[in-house]
Each structure stands twice: as C-alpha cells, then as structure tokens.
Amino acid sequence: MISPTKLLAMLVHRGLVSPTVAHEALASGAPGSWLVQRGHCTQAQWEQWLRTEAGTRPELRRYEVRELLGEGGVGRVFAAVDRADSNKEVALKVLRAELAADPVQAERFVHEARLLMELSHPHLVKGLRVAKEGDTIFFAMERLPGRVLQDVLAEEERLDEESALQIVVEVAQALSVLHGRGLVHRDVKPGNVIWSEERGAVLIDLGFATGADRATAGDTTAGTVHYIAPEQARGSGQLDVRADIYSLGATLYHLVTGSLPFEGRTSEEVLAKQVLESLSGERIRALSLSPQLHYFLEKMMAKDPAMRFQDPQVLQREIEAFLVQRRQQRELEERQQRERPRLGGRPPGKGSMFDRRSRRRRS
C-alpha cells in the first residue's frame, strides 16, 4: 500500500488538498485521522485514496488491478487479471482522470482502443476490450512479457546493428498493416516498441494514429519531437506513411548510436533542427558502423519525403536482403576459420592432441 507521505504528495498534485493542509497532516503523525477530524475528507474517502493511490489506480469490477507498468501524458498502464476470462493476465490502459472529461481526449482514447481491437498482426499489440466504469475510461490489451526499447537503451546504451535492423524490419511490417488501412502512426519511437522474446518487436500505442486523409494542419505536430519527420515538425500539410518511415529511421539511429539524431535545449529548437539540419554521420563513423547502415539511415531520414523509402515493405525487403547477406558472410568466415590448418600443419578436421583429448573426455 502507498505510504502516507507519497499519498499526500499525490493529493496535493491533483489539487485534492492544499500544500499547507498536507504538511500539517504529515506533521501530526497520523495524517488520515487528522484529515478526517478536521473535515478535509471522510474516513471512507481516506481509505479509498489509500487503495486507489489518490484516485490514480482504478477499482474495477471485472479486473483485479496490479502493478503499474508504465505511464505517459494520456494514460497509465497497469498489469491486471481478467476475472471474467479465467483470470487471464492483461494490460489495462486507463485514461487519466483529468482527461476523461474532455470529449476530444476521450474519443481519441476510444479510437485507439478500437483500432487495436480491429487490427491483428504479430508485431502490433492486440486490443481486447474498451469500457467505461463510473468516470473511468479504460481498455484491455494483451499482456506482453518484455521491455520497451527505451528501457533497453537506458540499461544497455545501444544495440548491435543486426538486432536494431531486425527490429526495424518487424516494426516496418506493423506499419505496412497500418498503411493498408490508410493510417499513419505518428509516434514511432523506442518508447512505443516492446521487445518480446516470443514476438520480437511489437508496436504499441496508437493514440496519435489517424487517417492520412484526415490529419489537419494543426494536428500533424502530434508525436515526440525527437523522432518526428520535418513535414510533421512544420505542422502543415497532410502526412502519409513516409512520416512514420522517418520516425522509424530516427528510432534506428537512437538504437545503434545510443544518442538522439537531433538535440536541443527546447522542443522548438529540436523541431527547427528536424526541418533545417542534415543528419550528421560523425557518430556513425566514430562507432565504425557499416556503410549500409548509414545508407538506410540517410534514406529513411531524408528531409524530402520523395527521397525516402516510399513504402514500409520496400524498406523491409532491402534490410532483410542485407541481413541475409551479412549472416551468410559471417557463416562463411566462421567456417573458413574452423577449417584453417592449426599450428603444426595438421590436416583440417583432425585437430590438436589437446582437442582430441578434450573430445574423449566429453564423450
């Protein structure tokens, strides 16, 4: 259960009690009793605040809500058990209470849920159910064991080329599904991709997804500034799948270099760089990354959409061909290394005395 100190801080943050009242309640040594005695809440309300962590953790009839998995500007995601479906483990995305009363935000949230329920692909998270209980709007998704790539980067700094490119291939497959429905994701980034041992890269969070023919001029800047395409940064014109390809390229850059392609002190500064500055190859060269990887980055992140990969499937095929070629070359080199005569000139295959003795011991 949440500590009284943390609970009071959350109550202040949500405007449910004043900072002065929270300080005096904490100083009393028994904040719940103090608040009740002075009429700031009832005993039942205090107990509910404790259970729901100041109203940020929902209480739902069908679901047993467990630990917090993550949170963003729109909602919080909890692990949960579906009591009505054989205690199946799910992930619950809950719209923030302060946004649930906004019809625009609520409609966007429900739109995301319905998209995830309609679409089905191994590299897209699957939506299961959307509902409203009291003032709480939420939807259930499949629970995927794994970590978002943002957390992987925080721990490992960067990924090797082949792992990063394989992730791009799999996210490109998910984008192809969205493209086939005339949709643009608009927020492809490491924080919206889960790495699962079972499924590989899985694209999540369609909260900004919209039809390419429905994106209005003022709405195209939705997304995360470090990854959005120049046309998205300008906030003018309609977007298509090439904006997602740019964002996937920025994600690839972050995965293989451990740094963002464009950085700045403010969001406005980053947006300006997205529009005006060319991608620097210094970091790529410093890490001795392959020329082919540099080519993929340059083509995915071209400022002019006409110069980018025009379709996720084309991008997928080119990267897959490169990965196959690279793996075959590595296997050839490993085979040649195994067959190379060892010191003493013994024929390949017989090995040294030490090798033969080791094999007898293992047998």
Image (cartoon, rainbow, N blue to C red):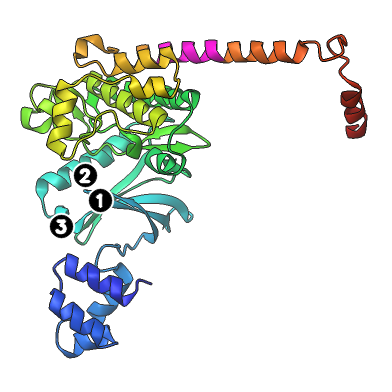
| Upstream in sequence: badge 1 or badge 2 | 1
Q: Which mark is residue 98?
A: 3
Q: CA distance from mark 1 to mark 2?
A: 9 Å
Task: Give the residue pinned by disc 1.
Answer: 75
Q: Is residue 227 above or below residue 337?
A: below
Q: CA distance from mark 2 to mark 3?
A: 13 Å
Q: Are marks 2 and 3 in contact (CB under 8 Å)?
A: no
Q: Amino acid at mark 3?
A: Glu
Q: CA distance from mark 3 to mark 1?
A: 10 Å
| Upstream in sequence: badge 3 or badge 1 | 1
For the question of whether residue 212 can be seen, the reply is: no
Q: Which region of the structure is painted magenta?
A: 316-326
Dot 2: element: helix
The mark closer to the camera, 2 or 3, is 3
Dot 1: element: strand
Q: Are marks 1 and 2 in contact (CB under 8 Å)?
A: yes
- x%, y% of residue 25? 22, 83
Question: Where is the C terminus found, in terms of image quarters?
Answer: top right
Task: Give the residue pinned by disc 2.
Answer: 109
Is residue 117 located in the magenta-colored stretch of the structure? no
The mark closer to the camera, 1 or 2, is 1
